[in-house]
Amino acid sequence: MEIGRVGVWHPMVGQAPAAEGRRAAAEIERLGYGSIWVNEGYAGKEPFASAAVLLAATERVTVGTGIANLWARDAMAMAGGAVTLADAFPGRFLLGVGVSHGPLVARRGHDYGKPLTAMRGYLDAMDEAERMLPKSDCPRLLAALRPRMLELSRERADGAHTYFVPPEHTAQARGILGTDRLLIPEQAIVLESDPARARATARAHMATYLQLPNYVNNLRTLGFTDDDLADGGNDRVVDAIVAWGGTEAVVERVRAHLDAGADHVLLQPLSPQGPDLADAVAQLTRLAPELGL
């Protein structure tokens, strides 16, 4: 699977009206980005169906799930969905599986309990399901932040998909994964050179994530304090999570992740009024030549 060094993670590629998603995916492919990732939000569109729509609208780009929630489907359904897309679009589908977050899982009516234990059991069931399904070449990544989930990504998957992390985390993750596993972090960006405007856009994006214990606890392990994380995050944490400025600032952050051990970096362009697919594509268009795509 050839995905290059840079891809795109944006909620609206899969969640927007299908016609808009198709046009955006085709343009992202034309610009030279190597992958497009769809998410699974609460009360959002189904990620395997969204991935199929985007794969059918493109010719070469890889599509990944970032992530498919294990609480949303049983292991047989997860494995079957992955096999279906890998068979229909050989070498173009990447399965990202994750445990999501306690508050979101509770809204689905499940007990979050012990997420690592849940993931281990789920992978056992997926392996059993895959023995009954047609063979497929579909890499499996786990959404992982902390060491034990990263270790599981090394032992039971092809690597890890990380989110809401600075390059320092990428270096730590690579150390745990070793050299032979994929590491694909997401990187939020804002092409805005005015510090106040850029950070306002970044904080609006970060607000929800700073309410989720998985992300907050991970940032604490990286040395951020409660004071850093309070009231939407101070400038230190905002600048660590969101790369803002001109194109050179984004290129520098991508390079930092790659130098820290990432195989592929997913850009998530942020917009002042919230997720905006047209604005995201415009930012990606400006960046493409600077990234050497």
Image (cartoon, grey):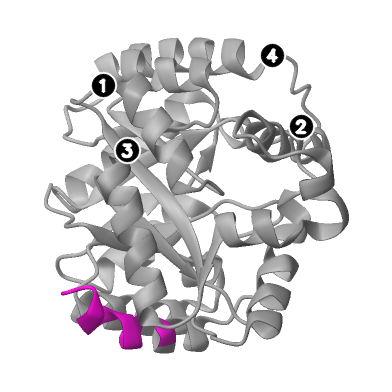
Question: Residue 102 shows which numbered tag?
Answer: 2
Give the amino acid at mark 1: Gly
For discs 3 and 2, the disc positioned in front in the rendered view:
3
The magenta-colored residue range is: 283-293
Q: Residue at x 81, y 59 (%)?
A: 232
Helix, strand or loop for disc 4? loop
Q: Please state which amino acid type lies under the numbered disc 2.
A: Gly
Q: Name the residue carrying label 3.
A: 183
Amino acid on which the number 3 mark rests in the picture: Leu
**Residue 247, position as x, y percentages in the image:** 37, 81
Quick one: label 1, few (<14), some, or many (20+) residues within 10 Å?
Answer: some
Query: Dot 3: few (<14), some (14–19), or many (≥20) neighbours within 10 Å?
Result: many
Q: CA distance from mark 3 to mark 2?
A: 24 Å
User: How many angstroms separate mark 2 from mark 1 (CA)?
Assistant: 29 Å
Indicate which disc, 3 or 1, sits on the residue closer to the N terminus: 1
Instruction: Write down the residue under mark 4.
Output: 114
- How many numbered discs sit on the rendered protein? 4
Q: CA distance from mark 2 to mark 4?
A: 10 Å
Give x and y (percent) for residue 263. Answer: 24, 45
Q: In the rendered view, does 154 fall on the left or right side of 272?
A: left
Q: Secondary structure at mark 2?
A: helix
Give how far apart the Cα atoms at labels 4 and 1 are: 25 Å
Residue 123 x, y percent position in the rendering: 43, 16
145 vs 124, nearest the viewer: 145
Q: Are marks 3 and 4 in contact (CB under 8 Å)?
A: no
Mark 2 or mark 4, which has the lower sequence index?
2
Q: Earlier in the sequence, mark 2 or mark 1?
A: 2
Residue under circle 1? 178
Secondary element at image label 3: strand
Picture residue at 26% right of the left edge, 47% below the top: 259
Label 2: how many residues lie within 10 Å, few (<14), some (14-19) or many (20+)?
Answer: some
